[in-house]
């Protein structure tokens, strides 16, 4: 009863800004959409979150009874709202076949060969190996070439591979990407090292950190890097985005990385200085590496995406789709932290699913449905590497060429009033117009990314759609709190103390007013996109539109 009174009070408070007239914006928000947006219910968001993060769901790990309970809950909401099944075989479900892989450390080795002498390295101290999804046993012995950051981005005026042949060789490089790159481009190019090395004919990849990048060192990441990894498989049993031709993928500790340069024409320090100046570089290291990776491979785990559709009202445009996505999974039961072992995932990401469910209700409440069809997907396997969204975006249950836009929500951060937002992705496409109009109606400002070093643009499910050439938006709270608190500090502190722990439960100071504003933004951006005569397009010459934009030229 107390919760009901709190929710009612929040609803009244929310009305203060809901009843404010919409101001003139580049895009006009029709009255029916304004009225629907004003009907947002903070108490509904809270109720969804309480169920999805309850202990009985045991952290919603894919393949567990807890995840199945969460999936059934989302299905029941879709049915109640009148959404149609848009999964496989007339159901709300899409199966996502997964392969598990883990390095068998005791059978995996690595040695440096310099001046005819072998230096055996110690697993976990000197090096860590990434598994090979293509074969259980992978062996290689080859010379090593240093390639700066291992980045090839001619469109940004930078290429570490220019003028050097790495075919049949192992490439070594720093983690990260040139600091002169824009944040999103830097995040992407820093993550594409395996793809680039394989495309250039390399047979292996070795990475290590700049001395200042303590977070990326194997000493910091050893527990995480030694866990099992999952990838989805296609009907032929091939795993996605893996490069079995790279017969060794290794991370080195700092002192071991420095030893690679002992016989080269440049020292580690010279290479570091060039990297800090964002100067492309490549040269032989005059040593070889011999490595053996033993990988245990297991199939059989089937994840599931939950897919519901609200058919559009326009006879022609109803065959195009605006897709909403939020990840339903979390980490399950883990080690005990402060007396609790259930990773409830209230903020990560029961919040995103709950906000999207309330946005779906607003769509269903419209007197006339949007012109384009609206699809909501609660995806699996995000915590395993964006697997469910990548599988759906690569193998959608609706025609891929007809997906015009994606809106993602993941940990939007509503621990303070929502006064400004960071709309990741809006600078890359024409969707910015819808974002600006929705923000003006809701009464929030547009802010710059306060934590570019976190590479947020690549860290959630919208990027799976970007990879398929589909413009995408991912909104998170900005740093303005309306009081003396620093929103960026709150965010970073939360990430340092609560993120991916059992303390991410409902005993947190959520601001339900702020959550309701997120619903309004999600709803209005998607509504305006669905109503537009033309589908969103990438900005002319945009980095991601040029690289992935199979739909960029479609109008």
Image (cartoon, rainbow, N blue to C red):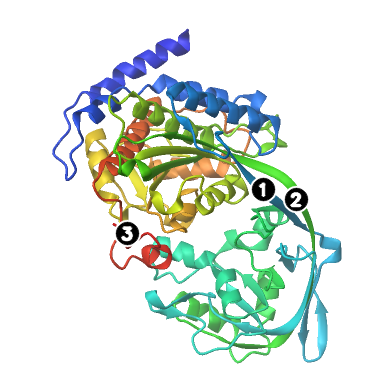
- Among the 4 quarters of the image, the one containing residue 498: top right
- Among the 4 quarters of the image, the one containing residue 120: bottom right
**Of marks 2 and 3, which one's residue comes earlier in the chain?**
2
Q: Is residue 158 visible?
A: yes
Q: Position of residue 86 (x, y in %)?
A: 50, 37
Task: Give the label, 3 or 1, closer to the camera.
Answer: 3
Task: Look at the numbered disc 3 and give the secondary structure of its residue.
Answer: loop
Q: Residue at x 65, y 74 (%)?
A: 205
Q: Nearer the viewer, residue 512 or 121?
A: 512
Q: Position of residue 208 (x, y in %)?
A: 62, 70
Q: Residue at x 33, y 65 (%)?
A: 542
The residue wearing badge 3 is 554
**Of marks 3 and 1, which one's residue comes earlier in the chain?**
1
Q: Residue at x 68, y 59 (%)?
A: 236
Residue 299, disc: 2
Q: Position of residue 450 (x, y in %)?
A: 38, 51
117 over 100 or under it: above or below? below
Please report contact status of discs 3 and 1: CB closer than 8 Å, yes or no.
no
Rounded to the nearest angstrom, the CA distance separating label 2 from label 1 is 8 Å
Residue 97, disc: 1
424 over 179 or under it: above or below? above
Q: Residue at x 49, y 21 (%)?
A: 47
Quarter of the figure with the C terminus? bottom left
Please report contact status of discs 2 and 1: CB closer than 8 Å, yes or no.
yes
Please report contact status of discs 2 and 3: CB closer than 8 Å, yes or no.
no
């Amino acid at each position: 009863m107390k919760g009901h009174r709190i929710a009612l009070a929040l609803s009244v408070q929310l009305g203060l800004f809901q009843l404010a007239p919409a101001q003139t914006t580049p895009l006009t928000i029709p009255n029916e959409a304004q009225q629907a947006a004003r009907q947002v219910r903070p108490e509904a968001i809270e109720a969804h979150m309480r169920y999805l993060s309850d202990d009985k769901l045991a952290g919603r790990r894919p393949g567990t009874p807890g995840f199945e309970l969460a999936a059934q809950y989302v299905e029941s909401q879709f049915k109640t709202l009148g959404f149609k099944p848009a999964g496989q075989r007339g159901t709300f479900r899409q199966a996502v076949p997964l392969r598990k892989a883990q390095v068998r450390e005791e059978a995996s080795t690595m040695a440096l060969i310099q001046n005819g002498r072998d230096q055996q390295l110690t697993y976990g101290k000197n090096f860590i190996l990434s598994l090979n999804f293509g074969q259980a046993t992978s062996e290689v012995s080859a010379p090593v070439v240093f390639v700066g950051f291992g980045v090839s981005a001619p469109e940004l005026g930078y290429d570490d591979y220019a003028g050097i042949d790495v075919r049949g060789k192992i490439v070594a490089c720093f983690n990260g990407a040139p600091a002169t790159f824009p944040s999103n481009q830097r995040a992407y190019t820093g993550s594409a090292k395996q793809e680039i090395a394989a495309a250039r004919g390399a047979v292996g990849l070795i990475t290590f950190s700049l001395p200042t990048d303590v977070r990326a060192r194997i000493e910091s990441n050893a527990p995480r890097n030694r866990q099992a990894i999952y990838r989805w498989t296609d009907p032929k049993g091939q795993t996605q985005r893996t490069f079995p031709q790279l017969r060794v993928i290794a991370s080195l500790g700092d002192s071991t990385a420095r030893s690679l340069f002992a016989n080269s024409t440049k020292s580690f320090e010279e290479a570091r200085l060039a990297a800090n100046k964002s100067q492309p570089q490549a040269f032989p290291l005059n040593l070889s590496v011999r490595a053996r990776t033993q990988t245990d491979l297991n199939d059989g785990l089937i994840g599931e995406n939950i897919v519901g559709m609200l058919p559009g009202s326009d006879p022609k445009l109803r065959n195009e789709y605006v897709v909403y996505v939020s990840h339903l999974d979390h980490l399950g039961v883990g080690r005990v932290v402060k007396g609790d072992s259930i990773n409830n995932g209230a903020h990560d990401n029961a919040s995103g699913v709950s906000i999207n469910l309330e946005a779906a209700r607003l769509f269903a409440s419209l007197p006339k449905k949007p012109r384009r069809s609206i699809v909501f997907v609660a995806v699996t396997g995000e915590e395993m590497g964006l697997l469910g969204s990548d599988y759906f975006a690569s193998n959608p249950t609706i025609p891929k060429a007809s997906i015009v836009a994606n809106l993602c929500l993941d940990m939007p951060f509503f621990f303070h009033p929502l006064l400004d937002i960071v709309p990741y992705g809006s600078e890359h496409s024409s969707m910015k117009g819808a974002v600006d109009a929705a923000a003006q109606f809701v009464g929030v400002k547009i802010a710059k990314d306060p934590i570019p070093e976190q590479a947020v643009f690549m860290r959630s499910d919208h990027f799976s759609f970007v990879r398929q050439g589909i413009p995408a938006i991912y909104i998170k709270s900005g740093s303005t709190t309306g009081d003396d608190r620093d929103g960026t500090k709150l965010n970073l502190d939360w990430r340092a103390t609560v993120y991916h722990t059992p303390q991410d439960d409902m005993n947190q100071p959520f601001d339900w007013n702020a959550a309701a504003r997120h619903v309004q933004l999600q709803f209005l951006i998607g509504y305006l996109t669905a109503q537009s005569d033309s589908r969103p397009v990438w900005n002319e010459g945009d980095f991601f539109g040029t690289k992935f934009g199979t739909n960029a030229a479609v109008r």
